[in-house]
Amino acid sequence: MGKHKFLVHEDGDYVGVAIEDIKAGEDVMGVELHSGKKVQVTSNHDIPLGHKIALRAVKKGEALIKYSESVGTVTQDIKIGDWVHTHNLKTARWDYGN
């Protein structure tokens, strides 16, 4: 499998962040920043550099955890290996009660 292609900011995060483009069907390894723990997943989609890859399944309406906190609400079911971005996540960053 070689070098890692995504980083996990905190243990328990639901996503990793691609540090290189990831291709659909690719088996990729990630590394948790603090512990160095390795995580392996098969990508279901092309995932561009800087975008998120799902490390666990998350149901529509659930919070998405990154940096050990909720960063938004899932707008459609997400499977392990899915590309996570604005098409399936409503970010909390811009949600001011609207």
Image (cartoon, rainbow, N blue to C red):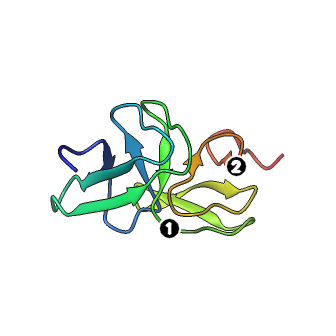
Dot 1: what SS?
Answer: loop
Question: Which tag, 1 or 2, sits closer to the chain's start?
Answer: 1
Q: Which residue is mark 2?
A: 88
Residue 80 coordinates in the image, percent (x, y): 52, 63
Residue 25 lies, with reference to residue 38, above or below; the image says above
Q: Which residue is mark 1?
A: 56
Residue at (69, 69) in percent of width and height: 59
Front-most of 42 and 84? 42
Residue 47 coordinates in the image, percent (x, y): 50, 37
Residue 40 coordinates in the image, percent (x, y): 32, 60
Q: Amino acid at mark 1?
A: Arg
Horizontal side of 48 relative to 29 (left or right) equals right
Dot 2: what SS?
Answer: loop
Horizontal side of 5 relative to 51 (left or right) equals left
Residue 58 lies, with reference to residue 6, above or below; the image says below
Residue at (49, 37) in percent of width and height: 51
Q: Quadrant of residue 17?
A: top left
Residue 43 coordinates in the image, percent (x, y): 47, 50
Q: Residues within 10 Å of mark 2 (few under 14, many from 20)?
A: some
Residue at (42, 30) in percent of width and height: 49
Q: Amino acid at mark 2?
A: Asn
Horizontal side of 6 relative to 70 (left or right) equals left
